[in-house]
Image (cartoon, rainbow, N blue to C red):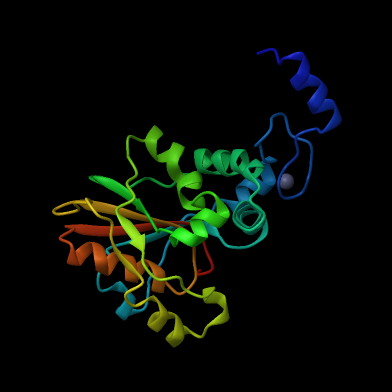
Amino acid sequence: MGKGVIQSVLDFLFPPSCPVCRAYVEQLGDWCPACMKEAQQPHAILLPALSQRFIGAVWALGIYRGGLRSLIHALKYRKKRSALPCIASFLQASSFVLPEGVDVAVPVPLHEARYRQRGFNQVELIFGEWLSAHGITMEQALVRTRKTEPLYKMARQERRKSLQGAFSLASGADVRGKHILLLDDILTTGATLSGCAAVLCQAGAARVDALVFASDHR
Ligand SMILES: [Zn+2]
């Protein structure tokens, strides 16, 4: 396929490069094969028993370090949507098989104030297109009712406390009898996922599994 003249000039001035090692690649969003291979580490995660009460399975597509970490940081904290093509090609290359029978995917919500400040929920931007290509729709079935301090500042116990009652069902959402795939960008302690899953189960969800883009669990 031929590229447009403008694209060719842009490629000459700013050649597309691997998001990790900066080697030149053919197209915007591509990774070099070596870095892509290293980043692809889909794995299941065992949460502590308390967190797992409401969650079936938890999976991560990669490890929260290196390329995945910098892509998430660029998108989330520097609002760089230019990270999205690299995220999209990472998802496309993933060997992860989505669980069967999922009725709807639900992103972990941001508090309204944080959403307004950032302008988007990064979880929706990361997973939206990929899931819809797999026939799974996303629904904002949860809202974050309390603004929590950044969790990385807190100890594990404090995190759990801070997240209690932080989420509730969005008005009009109906999750009764549904198999839900809960989505988040990163997983650290699992407190966020378990807080969300508890609300969904208490609202009648039949099953909640969770998928995160990257996890710091091995
Ligand atoms: Zn590379």
**Residue 143 lies in quadrant:** bottom left
Residue 43 visible somewhere in the drawing: no
Left or right side of 177 for 16: right
Q: Is residue 146 visible?
A: yes
- At a point 82% along the width and 21% down the height, the residue shown is 9
Residue 115 placed where, x, y %?
49, 55
Q: Between 38 and 210, which is closer to the camera in this rendering?
A: 210
Please name the residue shown 82% across and 33% down the image: 14
Tell me: residue 148, above or below residue 123: below
Instruction: From the top left corner, tell me how far across and down residue 29 is, in percent.
Output: 65, 37
- Give residue 83's quadrant in the image: top right
Residue 174 image offset from top left, x and y in percent:
19, 51
Residue at left 45%, top 70%? 147
> Closer to the camera, 138 or 79?
79
Residue 94 locus on image (x, y percent): 49, 44
**In the rendered picture of this protein, how many numbered marks are placed on residues?**
0
In the rendered view, does 84 fall on the left or right side of 16? Answer: left
Q: Residue furthest right?
A: 13
Front one among 33 and 59: 59
Q: Is residue 49 left or right of residue 62?
A: left
Viewport quadrant of the N terminus: top right
The vertical placement of 114 against 9, above or below, is below
